[in-house]
Amino acid sequence: MSETIFGKIIAGEIPADVVFEDEQSLAFRDVNPQAPIHVLVIPKREIANIAAAGDDDAALLGHLLLVARRVAEQLELADGYRLVINCGPDGGQTVDHLHVHLLGGRGLGWPPG
Ligand code: AMP
């Protein structure tokens, strides 16, 4: 059984609004969007967070970024967007399955909170 809510989405145990999928990854809309476009890109293989990724995950990590770019193109974020990876409690991570936030559709402030 999957341990996190994202594992359950991968397993098809709970629904998600999927915008892209391939062998290694899944991209779906965030249930609590922080921008007009808010998509999460996750690896199908469970990795808790970026701190838990190994050197042998380099290709997979690169793939997730390219998937995020592809989804940004698909959703026509021509004016730009932001990719965010939260890690651990201080990073604001709430789901222990690595994910890349793709945020866009409005001007985003900096620095983040
Ligand atoms: P983080 O705080 O970086 O761990 O991000 C976790 C994100 O997952 C949050 O933005 C949540 O809104 C989102 N989230 C939690 N459960 C679901 C779900 N079932 N479907 C889609 N997004 C979710």
Image (cartoon, grey):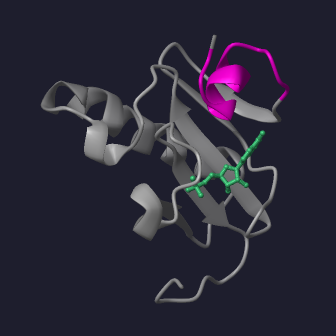
Instruction: Work out whether residue 48 or residue 32 is closer to the camera in this orientation and state it.
Output: 48
The residue nearer to you, when weighing 85 against 21, is 85
78 up-or-down from 48: above or below: below
Please state the total of marks drawn on the protein image.
0
Q: Position of residue 57 (x, y in %)?
A: 25, 28
- Point 52% across, 21% down: residue: 44
Q: Which span of residues is magenta-colored?
A: 2-15
Q: Give the residue displayed 47% in from the left and 19% down from the top.
A: 24
* Residue 65 can be seen, yes or no: yes
Q: Which image quadrant: the C terminus? A: bottom right
Say which residue appears at 49% left-offset and 60% top-offset: 83
User: Which of the 4 image quadrants contains residue 70?
Assistant: top right
Q: Position of residue 13 (x, y in %)?
A: 80, 16
- Pinpoint residue 64: horizontal percent, then vertical percent: 43, 37
The N terminus appears in which quarter of the rendering? top right
Name above or below for residue 76 compared with residue 107.
above
**Picture coordinates of residue 35, whole percent (x, y):** 74, 70
Q: Is residue 20 above or below residue 28?
A: above
Look at the image and say whether residue 104 sits in the magenta stretch: no
Residue closest to the eye, 90 or 83: 90
